[in-house]
Amino acid sequence: MSAQPQLYSVFLTGRVQFHQFRTHTLVSEKISKAKKEENAQIPMSGELMRKVIHLLSLSIPIGYFYLGYSTTLWILIPLTLFALFMDYGRYYIKWIDKFVKWSFGSILREHERDSSRKLLSGGSYVLISACICILLFPKIVAITAFSILIISDTSSALIGRKFGKNYFLDKSLEGTTAFILSAWIVVLFTPKVNGIWQEYVIAFIAAAIGGIVEAMSVRLHVDDNFSIPLSVGISMWLGYFLLSVIDPGAFEPLYRLLVK
């Protein structure tokens, strides 16, 4: 009689372990398939060219810093509308489709070329997210969040594709590490309200959150050009706000300067 509980316990343990192994295997297979599909879409040369164009988007936060709110939006909104017209127009107008394929065909991913799905390209998402960040967030937050998108997404993609071997969520651990480390470097050079150490802590935490969100891009079904700056921006703004709530006497003036 005493052997029966032991056998039942062994059976349950084995069943749980098998279930955990099977779940881990299915998740790994799904992530591996997604990663292989992503990496198989364009060659490394195309990926490098894609990231060079991506880096040119640094002109947006730099321009915003020097030109200000109104001027930047007067330039950015028409560019975004034009990009959307070209991006959607290629699915319906032949000459636009030919022009886009001739100009950017080698760097478009498979899902961006799929006419049946009619999805936006990453470039359109970059411009849309830039407009939203500038409209939604305080200037310092928008500049930091968008700079992290440009630098850290590039670092994550290149390092993850070249050296990624260990899975972390939907991406590689190596790529996510590269994202967070490069984002922390960006934080050191982006503008601050007063430059106190608490601002750096807020930005470092927001950068790490952005790295985690980027690593979850497959399961979130959201383009990371959109999700990264929004997650970083919301985290930073919330961090400043919480400081002003925790110690209004010390940090409420800081928050007022941030949203001024």
Image: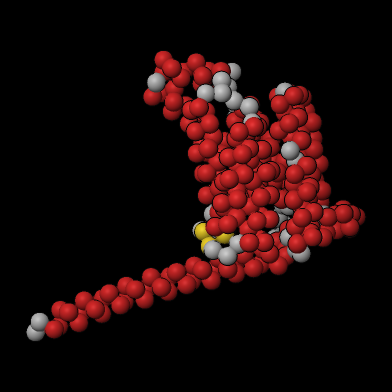
Where does residue 126 sit, x and y in percent of width and height? 70, 44
Quadrant that contains the C terminus: top right
Where does residue 202 sit, x and y in percent of width and height? 50, 33
Determine the residue positioned at 80% across, 54% down.
49
Tell me which corner region of the image, top left, top right, bottom left or bottom right, holds residue 10: bottom left
Against 142, residue 18 (above or below) is below
Determine the residue positioned at 74% across, 24% down.
66
Where does residue 176 sit, x and y in percent of width and height? 57, 53
Against 86, residue 74 (above or below) is above
- In depth, the one of 116 and 215 nearer the eye is 215
Specify the color scheme.
secondary structure
- In depth, the one of 190 and 96 nearer the eye is 190
Tell me which corner region of the image, top left, top right, bottom left or bottom right, holds residue 60: top right
Q: Is residue 184 visible?
A: yes
Instruction: Point out the residue furthest to the left here.
Output: 1
The answer to whether residue 146 is left or right of residue 166 is right
